[in-house]
Image: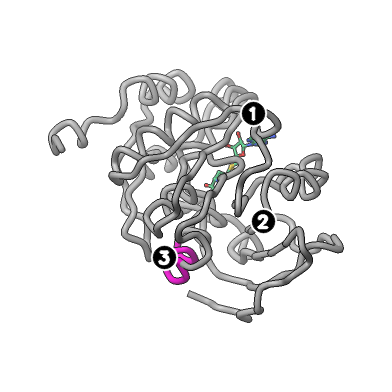
Amino acid sequence: MNSTRLLQPPAALQAALGELLGDAQLVAASLPGTHLKLWLIDPANMQRAFNPEETRRILEEPPYWCFCWASGLVLARWLAEQPEWVRGKRVLDFGSGSGVAAIAAAKAGALEVVACDLDPLALAACRANAELNDVQLSYSADFFAEADRFDLIIVADVLYDRANLPLLDQFLSRGQQALVADSRVRDFQHPQYQRIGLLDACTWPDLAEPAEFRLVSLYHASRDGVTAVPTGTNHS
Ligand SMILES: C[S@@+](CC[C@H](N)C(=O)[O-])C[C@H]1O[C@@H](n2cnc3c(N)ncnc32)[C@H](O)[C@@H]1O
């Protein structure tokens, strides 16, 4: 592998970020509590106020892919500590963003991992980050075009938009099981989902979000109704 090339931010992603925030840089950041690196926005770029035009652009097309969201970080740590969740399995990461959970699943020994995101820039980020971490992923822009062939659907911080809640039913239409981590929604009631953990993490780089967003709930659902053994609360 060419280490010099690895230090250069992927040109298309850097250009896309530059269109949003002229001075923003992508850097290869180490994720705390993991062995993973991702191309993420340089935290130095978050230390100034954004002008109204920049704010409008960010809100219109949020560059989710240049952050590792708290739930993605939780799933990455969870899968590294408990690789049996994915080892030898076919896994789809729904709303993959940077690809953090997909890459963690591949590192933990999954047979196949599909990174799925409707944002083409997110899929480009997944490709760049897979290369950075030396893993192979497959890619999908449309979850509903996928066949019902997965052992596990993993989902990190996708329920921020409550319009996505009906997706909880859909995950089990493509996978035998689902593992859903969310820092925004921790009160949903769904007959097939059971909360199996409550873990500390923050979005990276740290957005200094309110404390409530630094607690990630982890839910498990199984098509056959068998629930994973609860592991309780783990503050790391
Ligand atoms: C907050 S980001 C989380 C990214 C990543 N999972 C993490 O934890 O860092 C949410 C991601 O979900 C994607 N997303 C939202 N709705 C989706 C849908 N219906 N199908 C696929 N991806 C979706 C967005 O494009 C975005 O990349």
Prevailing secondary structure class for the magenta stretch in the rendered image: helix
- The amino acid marked with disc number 3 is Ala
- The amino acid marked with disc number 1 is Asp
Residue at numbered disc 2? 178
- The amino acid marked with disc number 2 is Ala
> Residue 213 shows which numbered tag?
none
Q: Earlier in the sequence, mark 3 or mark 2?
A: 3
At x 64% / y 59%, what residue is drawn? Answer: 179
Q: Whole-Å distance between the Cαs marked 3 and 2?
A: 17 Å
- Of the four image quadrants, the one with ligand 1 is top right
Q: Whole-Å distance between the Cαs marked 2 and 1?
A: 17 Å
Residues 88 and 234: in front is: 88
Q: Position of residue 187 (x, y in %)?
A: 80, 63
Mark 2 touches mark 1? (CB < 8 Å):
no
Q: Secondary structure at mark 3?
A: helix
Left-right relation of 233 to 25: right
Q: Is mark 3 within 8 Å of ligand 1?
A: no
- Between marks 3 and 2 in the image, the one whose residue lies nearer the viewer: 2
Q: Position of residue 30 (x, y in %)?
A: 31, 53
Q: Secondary structure at mark 2?
A: strand
Q: Earlier in the sequence, mark 2 or mark 1?
A: 1
Q: Secondary structure at mark 1?
A: loop
Q: Is mark 2 within 8 Å of ligand 1?
A: no
At x 28% / y 44%, what residue is drawn? Answer: 134
Q: Is residue 186 above or below residue 164?
A: below
79 is within the stretch colored magenta: yes
Residue at numbered disc 1? 142
Span of residues in magenta: 77-83
> Residue 80 shows which numbered tag?
3
Q: Is mark 1 within 8 Å of ligand 1?
A: yes
Mark 3 touches mark 1? (CB < 8 Å):
no
